[in-house]
Image (spheres, helix red, strand yellow):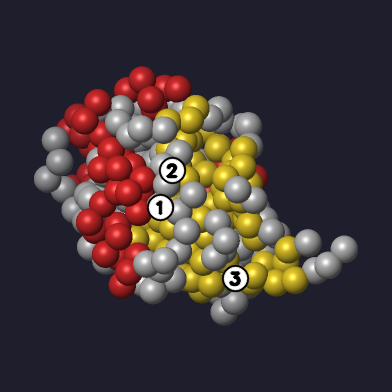
């Protein structure tokens, strides 16, 4: 049996209430998690990140909200013209609820808790509590490198904690600061939705989830889906930094906050492949 190494690349192209998309690939296979910004922006940000020729062999949709699926129909056509038709993966609940104008060709149904492959990448859909029909987060495993993209959940769960535990890279929601949300301009109804068990994680909740799920293999933590109205990168980073500091891994784990209007520089992690 031959052992060789390969680079796994993770690039958060956009993250926040105005649109979400993350690329994960190893040069031989790749996926997008969500496509909530325009196809033009997705391709431009991949290009700016040096990933214009990176393979896209599947698109993983977490749920039907527009900030996660708005570009799906156009992206499906663009990828088919560029290379070949690419499957879009989602749960049955997401398919039933998606705006028909966003509906891409080539949908394949997945079930939470049942892994599948996109070429040699292993994809694990993880159920999360959010106010839609059948939402999931995803772990994508390339060789021996698990990468988790976990956003849009209203509370920490044991399943999500376990999903984080052996990850090398985690993209994790730190949506809002509780005081900023409570004292901010949103309506009482919207505040209650965001704060509810099927809304979004506060910095405090996300920090607790990180503490529960923090494993010894984590190299990179990206804070995602920050609210522009109810959070700041400084607040979110401080909450995450405190957890990493208590665990004694602050100097080892590379910590950063994702951006809404630009891609983060790509992260590269080496994987072993047999």
Question: Is residue 236 among the parts visible in the rendering?
Answer: no
Q: Please say if 135 is above or below 97.
A: below
Name the residue rendered at 43%, 38% in the picture.
Answer: 88
Quadrant of the image containing the C terminus: bottom right
Residue 26, compared with residue 59, is above or below; it is below
Q: Earlier in the sequence, mark 1 or mark 3?
A: 3
Local SS, label 1: loop
Q: Is residue 128 left or right of residue 12?
A: right
Quickly name the residue at label 2. 86
Q: Say which residue label 1 marks.
A: 83
Tag 3: Cα neighbours inside 10 Å, few (<14), some, or many (≥20)?
some
Residue positioned 42% across, 66% down in the render: 53
Find numbered disc 2 in the image and state the secondary structure of the residue it sits on: loop
- The residue lying toward the viewer, choosing from 223 and 126, is 126
Query: Where residue 49 sits: x, y (%)?
Result: 36, 72
Distance between the Cα atoms at labels 2 and 1?
9 Å
Say if mark 3 contacts mark 2, CB within 8 Å: no
Crowding around mark 2 (Cα neighbors within 10 Å: few <14, some 14 to 19, many 20+) is many
Query: Foreground residue, 217 or 72?
Result: 72
Q: In the rendered image, which residue does mark 3 sit on?
A: 7
* Label 3: which secondary element: strand
């Amino acid at each position: 049996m031959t052992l060789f190494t390969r680079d796994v690349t993770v690039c958060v192209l956009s993250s926040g209430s105005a649109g979400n998309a993350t690329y994960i690939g190893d040069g031989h296979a790749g996926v997008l998690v969500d496509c909530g910004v325009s196809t033009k922006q997705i391709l431009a940000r991949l290009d700016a990140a040096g990933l214009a020729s990176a393979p896209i062999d599947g698109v993983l949709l977490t749920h039907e909200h527009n900030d996660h699926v708005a570009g799906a129909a156009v992206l499906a056509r663009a990828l088919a013209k560029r290379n070949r038709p690419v499957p879009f993966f989602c749960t049955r609940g997401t398919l039933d609820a998606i705006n028909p104008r966003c509906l891409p060709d080539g949908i394949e149904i997945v079930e939470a808790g049942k892994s599948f492959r996109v070429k040699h990448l292993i994809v694990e859909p993880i159920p999360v509590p959010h106010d839609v029909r059948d939402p999931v987060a995803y772990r994508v495993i390339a060789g021996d490198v698990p990468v988790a993209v976990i956003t849009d959940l209203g509370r920490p769960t044991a399943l999500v904690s376990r999903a984080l535990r052996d990850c090398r890279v985690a993209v994790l929601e730190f949506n809002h600061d509780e005081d900023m949300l409570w004292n901010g301009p949103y309506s009482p109804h919207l505040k209650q939705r965001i704060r509810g068990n099927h809304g979004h994680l506060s910095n405090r909740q996300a920090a607790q989830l990180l503490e529960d799920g923090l494993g010894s293999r984590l190299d990179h933590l990206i804070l995602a889906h920050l609210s522009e109205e109810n959070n700041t990168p400084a607040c979110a980073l401080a909450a995450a930094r405190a957890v990493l500091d208590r665990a004694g891994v602050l100097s080892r784990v590379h910590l950063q906050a994702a951006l809404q209007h630009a891609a983060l520089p790509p992260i590269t992690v080496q994987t072993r492949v047999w």
